[in-house]
């Protein structure tokens, strides 16, 4: 399998807090990689350091053979790394459709020049409609994002990421706060993306889902990798059990 | 009411409409708190006035006022990147006070005595209230056309995204910093243009013309009309500039009335009187839609396609 992204010795410190403390990871094309870990393990910080929200304190992020660490978030999106947010960030005043349109413009936001290009051309609307149908947002397409339920907002996050046609999609807890029914639907959606050959990194608290969806899982605890392997290997790892359930009394 | 008086009010209303539209670019579209638009109004006014009093061409002076004000605005845009909402509001208030003090102290701006500007003569016509009114209207029409185009462009989409959520905007490729600086530059440049017209129309300017209270007036116009729309600021500017005539009985308490109106609007009708989704605007468009049904958007069609499918 071809390597899509490699992370080498990544460190992300906030003053004395070592949120990520020397992290290595390879992400391969067309694989679904899960990142799990207890609360506060540094999962979202890791996403933010990879996606350019933060500049890593040290280490490298290599995407398609080029070093990209410290590249601003908007440039990362243009390079083909799309991410969703753990806490949904809809453009509340816009419709669901327009939210996806906004993301479809990923390569259009060039500054002054963008004034001279109409946003909602037929091509853009076609593309947006296709993504909206793909993730199941048809019934709320003309609703304002502030008026739809969390389940739809989760799908919207995924739709906005997909419409940028990313090489790598990074999902930050797409099932957080959802009902079982909605979780199943999102899981089905991720499975579908996977079957289409999309490279995916998934942060998820729901372990059964992560185990089901992912080809490989990396376990993060206190900013360090404590295990990595197939779901089966990780499930039986002593350190992982300790990190999640605490040590057994002797 | 004689026509001289009428055009005097109309000219003021038109100039303030330009100001309200320029503030709307920064606050309404890009969502950046800006409480010091009068400072840029002043920079444009003094720049243009200094140029024409030194024998420069009137239109050249207007362009220069626009450029200088926009340049200062770009600097503020850079500053704004490091400041969140409330802090940006306070900083811009501060800038307004600093600029007013500078206008009052500097030799080039005439100090406390202000500047006297002779009325320009264009094509043999000495510009009066009427001419300034029509000049401002031309600029307003051009500006509105540009704004309509902007809202449909990727530029407009970028500003709308930043206004709603800048972290989300970054996640799909928007260079938030760049667009924020552009919004400040364009908005303040427009305010500078309005300033140039104002200075020549008044024939005399002094620092108090560009005081903080003027900024608040412009904020009131935009908020009362409807933030983030084109019609809102125009309506707000017309309303607020005609209010002093209506509120003559209130005399010295006019500022109080503005303040009260602003507080009430923000509390009870944040969309403004005729902003999107305001009760009044919904009622008006409701009537209009009965006669002329709204053209269905692509999003409406998508929704219909599934709703229709369910019924079948």
Image (cartoon, coloured by chain):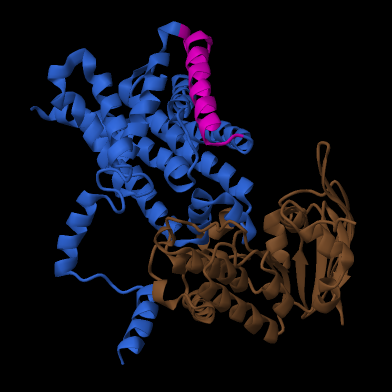
Residue B20 place in picture, x, y as percent: 36, 37
User: Looking at the figure, which quarter contains the N terminus of chain B?
Assistant: top left
Query: B177 and A90: which one is in front?
Result: A90
Display colour for chain B? blue
Task: Report if residue B125 is visible in the image.
Answer: no
Chain identifier, brown in the render:
A
| Corner quadrant of residue B206 | top left
Please give the name of the residue rendered at 30% of the width and 45% of the height, measured from the top-left corner. Answer: B232
User: Looking at the figure, which quarter contains the C terminus of chain B?
Assistant: bottom left
Residue B51 place in picture, x, y as percent: 49, 24
Query: B21 and B310: which one is in front?
Result: B310
Residue A189 part of the magenta segment: no
Query: B150 and A25: which one is in front?
Result: A25
| Corner quadrant of residue B122 | top left
* The residue positioned farthest toward the bottom in the image shown: B312
Query: A36 and B153: which one is in front?
Result: A36
Q: Is residue B8 left or right of residue B303?
A: left
Please give the name of the residue rendered at 49% of the width and 49% of the height, measured from the top-left corner. Answer: B163
Residue A10 place in picture, x, y as percent: 87, 54
Location of residue B2 with respect to A23 vertically, above or below: above
Location of residue B69 with respect to B292 vertically, above or below: above
Task: Report if residue B284 is visible in the image.
Answer: yes
Location of residue A22 with respect to A177 vertically, above or below: above
Our reading of the magenta stretch's main secondary structure is: helix
Task: State which region is magenta.
Answer: B83-111
């Amino acid at each position: 399998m071809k390597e899509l992204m490699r992370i080498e010795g990544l460190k992300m410190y906030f003053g004395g807090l070592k949120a990520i403390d020397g992290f290595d990871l390879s992400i391969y094309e067309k694989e679904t990689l899960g990142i799990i870990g207890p609360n506060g393990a540094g999962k979202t910080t890791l996403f933010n350091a990879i996606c350019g929200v933060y500049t890593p304190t040290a280490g490298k992020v290599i995407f398609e053979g080029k070093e990209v660490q410290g590249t601003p978030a908007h440039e990362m999106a243009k390079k083909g790394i799309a991410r969703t947010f753990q806490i949904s960030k809809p453009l509340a005043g816009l419709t669901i459709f327009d939210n996806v349109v906004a993301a479809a413009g990923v390569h259009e936001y060039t500054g002054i020049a963008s004034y001279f290009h109409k946003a909602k051309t037929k091509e853009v609307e076609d593309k947006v409609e296709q993504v909206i149908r793909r993730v199941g947002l048809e019934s709320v397409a003309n609703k304002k994002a502030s008026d739809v339920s969390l389940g739809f907002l989760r799908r919207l996050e995924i739709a906005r990421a997909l419409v940028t046609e990313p090489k790598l999609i990074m999902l930050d807890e797409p099932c957080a706060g959802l009902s079982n029914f909605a979780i199943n639907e999102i899981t089905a959606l991720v499975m579908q993306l996977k079957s289409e050959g999309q490279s995916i990194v998934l942060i998820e608290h729901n372990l059964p889902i992560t185990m089901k969806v992912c080809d490989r899982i990396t376990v993060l605890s206190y900013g360090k990798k404590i295990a990595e392997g197939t779901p089966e290997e990780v499930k039986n790892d002593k350190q992982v059990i300790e990190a999640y359930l605490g040590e057994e009394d002797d | 009411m004689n026509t001289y008086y009428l055009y005097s009010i109309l000219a003021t209303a038109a100039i303030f409409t330009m100001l309200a539209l320029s503030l709307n670019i920064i606050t309404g579209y890009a969502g950046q708190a800006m409480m010091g638009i009068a400072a840029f109004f002043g920079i444009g006014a003094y720049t243009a006035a200094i140029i024409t009093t030194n024998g420069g061409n009137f239109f050249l002076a207007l362009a220069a006022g626009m450029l200088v004000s926009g340049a200062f605005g770009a600097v503020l845009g850079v500053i704004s990147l490091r400041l969140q909402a409330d802090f940006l509001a306070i900083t811009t208030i501060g800038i307004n006070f600093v600029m007013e003090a500078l206008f009052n102290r500097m030799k080039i701006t005439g100090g406390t005595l202000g500047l006297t500007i002779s009325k320009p003569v264009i094509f043999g016509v000495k510009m009066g209230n009427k001419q300034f009114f029509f000049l401002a209207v031309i600029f307003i029409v051009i500006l509105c056309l540009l704004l309509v185009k902007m809202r449909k462009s990727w530029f407009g989409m970028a500003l709308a995204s930043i206004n709603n959520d800048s972290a989300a905007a970054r996640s799909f490729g928007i260079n938030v910093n760049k667009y924020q600086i552009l919004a400040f530059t364009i908005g303040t440049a427009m305010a500078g243009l309005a300033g140039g017209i104002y200075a020549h129309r008044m024939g005399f300017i002094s620092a108090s013309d560009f005081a903080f209270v003027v900024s608040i007036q412009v904020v009131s116009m935009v908020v009362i009309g409807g933030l983030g729309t084109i019609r809102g600021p125009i309506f707000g500017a017309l309303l607020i500039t005609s209010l002093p005539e209506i509120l003559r009985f209130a005399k010295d308490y006019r500022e109080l009335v503005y303040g009260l109106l602003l507080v009430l609007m923000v509390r009870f009708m944040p969309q403004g009187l005729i902003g999107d989704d305001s009760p009044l605007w919904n009622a008006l468009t409701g009537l209009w839609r009965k006669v002329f049904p709204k053209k269905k958007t692509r999003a409406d069609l998508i929704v219909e396609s599934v709703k229709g499918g369910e019924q079948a």
